[in-house]
Every structure is written in C-alpha cells, then in structure tokens.
Image (cartoon, helix red, strand yellow):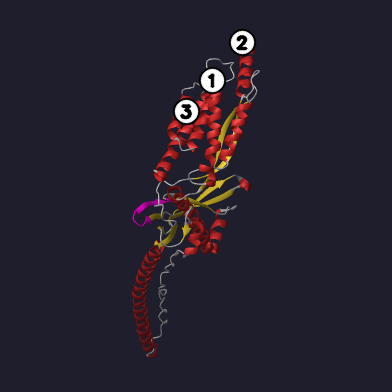
C-alpha cells in the first residue's frame, strides 16, 4: 500500500513538473532558399515541353498497322484457300449429279448425291485499335509548373519537362465484406515518370532528374459484383482512360513542380516554431520569459518579408539578448531555483532556433550542443530536431549567399 501511494505521489510530482513548461506555437512563413541556384542576374524562366508520349503513340500505331497487315494477309490467304475448297467441293458435287442424272435417264434410278456441307467462310481477326495518349497543352502544364520567385518569360532559365507515356497499367481487385455487404474495390496501378531539367545560360545544366519514378495508384469505382465492374468497363473504357490520364498527369506534374521549387525556386514555406516559456513555479516569476517570447514572435512574423530575413533581425536579436540575460541567472544544479536545469535547457533551445533563423549557424550550434548535454530529455530531443533544421538551413544559405 505504501509503495502504491509513493508511486502515485511521484506521478503527481512528475505531472506538476511537466506542466511548468509552455510550448508556445508560433506560426510563421519564410522564403526557402534553393540548393541548385540559378545565377542571380536571371529573374525569368521558360518552359520547354518534350512530349515523349507522342513517340509511344507512333510506336503503338506502327505495331497496330503491322498487326493489321499481318491479320489481313492471313485472312486473304485463308479466304483464297476457302474459295478453292468450296469450288472443288462444288465441282465434285456437280460431277456426281451429272453422273446420277445420266444413269437415272438411262433407266437406273437411284437417290441423288447429298449436297456438300461447305466450310464456314473465314473471318478476319479483329485487331483492336491501341489506346493512344491524349495531348496536353503548354498552358495546361504551365498552370501546374511554375518557378516561385521568378517571372515567366524568355532570357533566363530553361525548364525542360518530359511527359512520358503511362506504362505498366494493371487493375487490382480487392474483395471486402461478406454476404450482401460484399464489395469489390478496384485500383489501377501504373507508372508515369517525368523528366525534369533546368538549364541556365553560363551555368549549363544545374538540375536533371526523373520524378515520380515509381508505381502510382488511381482509385476506381466499387461494385457489388465483379461482373458489374466488367460491364462498367465495357461501357466506359474510353472515359476511364481519359480520367486516369488526366489525374495521373496532374499528380505527376505536381510532384515535378515540388521538386523544381525545392531545388531551384524560392517558395514561401510555413513552419510552426516552438518558443518555450514557464508557468508559475513555486514563488518564482517568469514575466521576463513572456516578454522575450512576445518579442521573438514579432520577429518570426516578419520572416517572409525578404530572402535574407533582415526585417526579422532586430526583434530576434532583442529576444536573444533577453534570453541570455535570463540565462546569466542559471543554476542548473538547484532544482528549486528560478533558472534550474529545465529552464536553462529551454532557454538554450529558444536561443538556438532564433540564431538559426538569423543565419548565425555557428552560434546556433553552440546552444544546440548545450541543450543536448543538459540532461533534460525533452530538450535533448528538441536540440536534435534543431540540429537537423540547422543543417538544412545552412546548406541552403551557403548555396545561395555563399
């Protein structure tokens, strides 16, 4: 009983301790810098579309024509043989009838010969017309593919998009439920990789890759019977293909646009920063942390105003100065002190993230390492997350600003 009471008491203490820290969520926007940088003198981009599906259409038509010619040749040969066979059978029959008639006229009556059973006339094999890819226009592609931070026009970067044909198409059936609740669900699996290349005058090719290079899925209608699905396909084959192709291309182009902007553009991104404060703990007052949080929030709200984030600089430096002043009071060995180990670690995380967005990565790294070695698990985990953020931000900053 005493052991249980002790555990309950310890749990209550941990619960109270966990409630001391407030994770203030600050939503902010920022301009993401590229990793594959287009020379700064260029502010325009243009699109070049390579329609590889047209070659696939030509190949399909060539195969269709070859099959059609082969089926026609086979049919013509079968028809000629059939005509010869029918003529031969008819000749034999007429010869037999002539002999029968002459014998019958000479007084030797007999039953007439049976009429021949002619073979069925051959039918030419039906060669199905191939399913050809529909065209997609430049404006349709331009509605999806655009380079953030640049204007559309000539005299800058050339973005080459290769639209490949859909391939490896297959329909998968999944039966679910029992009895009258049975459903047959259908999914179409396919591949639609797209080529992406960015060429810049004086730089050459700065990005060349294949996107969407894997199996994709297209959800189809569900039915109460698998035969209903087959009936639906008989009536809607063309519409099915049109809808699949339209959605597949839109999905693939969206992936391509994301890759393009992630590597070469200046997209506006969203992030939720965590700025830590402390609720009332014992008799201590933490109004100074609230003030610093307010100042930092004002800075983070200005992040998207420019690529170098200078508009946020003043407020973030002010917040850092306030946090450092509080950090001077740190006594991590004293758990009951105002700035104990937990508050010390949360301040280090606050400062580290602010330094990351100020592009002072060396200072950010110092405070991240302090938080990692704090012994406070919550902020060790946060410090590891900030470390990953720092590496990406530093990579992009150095790529663009050098």
Q: Which residue is disc 1 drawn over?
A: 330
**Going 53% across and 20% down the picture, which residue do you hit?**
330
Q: Earlier in the sequence, mark 1 or mark 3?
A: 1
Q: Residues within 10 Å of mark 1 (few under 14, many from 20)?
A: many
Give the structural element (helix, strand or loop) at label 3.
helix
**Percent from the top left, x then y, of residue 208?**
37, 52
- Asked if the residue under mark 3 is in contact with the one under mark 1, i.e. CB atoms within 8 Å, the reply is no
Along the line of sight, which residue is nearer the eye, 275 or 63? 275
Q: Earlier in the sequence, mark 3 or mark 2?
A: 2
| Mark number, residue 3 | 2
Whole-number angstrom distance, CA of label 1 to CA of label 2: 35 Å
Tell me the quadrant of the picture where the N terminus can be found.
top right
**Going 45% across and 39% down the picture, which residue do you hit?**
393
Q: Residues within 10 Å of mark 2 (few under 14, many from 20)?
A: few
Magenta span of residues: 199-212
Whether residue 378 appears in this view of the structure is: no
Q: Main secondary structure of the magenta part?
A: strand
């Amino acid at each position: 009983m005493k052991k249980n009471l002790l555990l309950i008491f310890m749990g209550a203490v941990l619960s109270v301790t966990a409630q001391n820290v407030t994770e203030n969520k600050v939503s902010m926007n920022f301009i993401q810098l590229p990793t594959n940088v287009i020379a700064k003198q260029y502010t325009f981009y243009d699109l070049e579309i390579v329609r590889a599906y047209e070659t696939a259409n030509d190949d399909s038509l060539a195969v269709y024509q070859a099959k059609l010619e082969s089926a026609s040749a086979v049919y013509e040969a079968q028809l000629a043989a059939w005509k010869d066979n029918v003529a031969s059978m008819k000749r034999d029959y007429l010869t037999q009838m002539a002999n029968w008639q002459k014998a019958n006229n000479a007084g030797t009556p007999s039953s007439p010969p049976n009429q021949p059973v002619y073979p069925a006339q051959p039918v030419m094999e039906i060669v199905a017309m191939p399913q050809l890819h529909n065209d997609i226009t430049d404006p349709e592609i331009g509605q999806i593919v655009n380079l953030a931070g640049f204007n559309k026009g000539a005299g800058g970067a050339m973005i080459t998009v290769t639209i490949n044909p859909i391939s490896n198409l297959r329909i998968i059936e999944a039966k679910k439920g029992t009895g009258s609740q049975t459903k047959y669900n259908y999914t179409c699996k396919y591949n639609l990789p797209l080529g992406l290349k960015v060429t810049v005058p004086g730089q050459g090719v700065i990005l060349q890759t294949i996107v969407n290079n894997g199996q994709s899925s297209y959800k189809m209608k569900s039915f109460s019977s698998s035969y209903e699905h087959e009936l639906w396909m008989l009536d809607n084959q063309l519409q099915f293909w049109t809808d699949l192709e339209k959605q597949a291309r839109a999905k693939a182009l969206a992936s391509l646009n994301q890759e393009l902007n992630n590597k070469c553009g200046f997209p506006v991104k969203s992030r939720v920063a965590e700025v830590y404060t402390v609720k009332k703990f014992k008799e201590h007052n933490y109004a100074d942390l609230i003030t610093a949080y307010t100042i930092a929030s004002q800075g983070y709200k200005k992040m998207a105003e420019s690529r170098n984030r200078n508009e946020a600089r003043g407020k973030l430096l002010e917040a850092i100065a306030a946090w450092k002043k509080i950090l001077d009071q740190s006594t991590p060995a004293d758990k009951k002190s105002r700035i104990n180990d937990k508050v010390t670690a949360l301040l280090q995380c606050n400062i580290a993230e602010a330094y990351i967005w100020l592009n002072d990565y060396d200072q950010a790294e110092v405070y991240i390492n302090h938080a990692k070695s704090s012994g406070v698990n919550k902020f060790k985990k946060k410090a590891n997350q900030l470390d990953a953020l720092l590496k990406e931000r530093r990579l992009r900053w150095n790529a663009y600003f050098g």
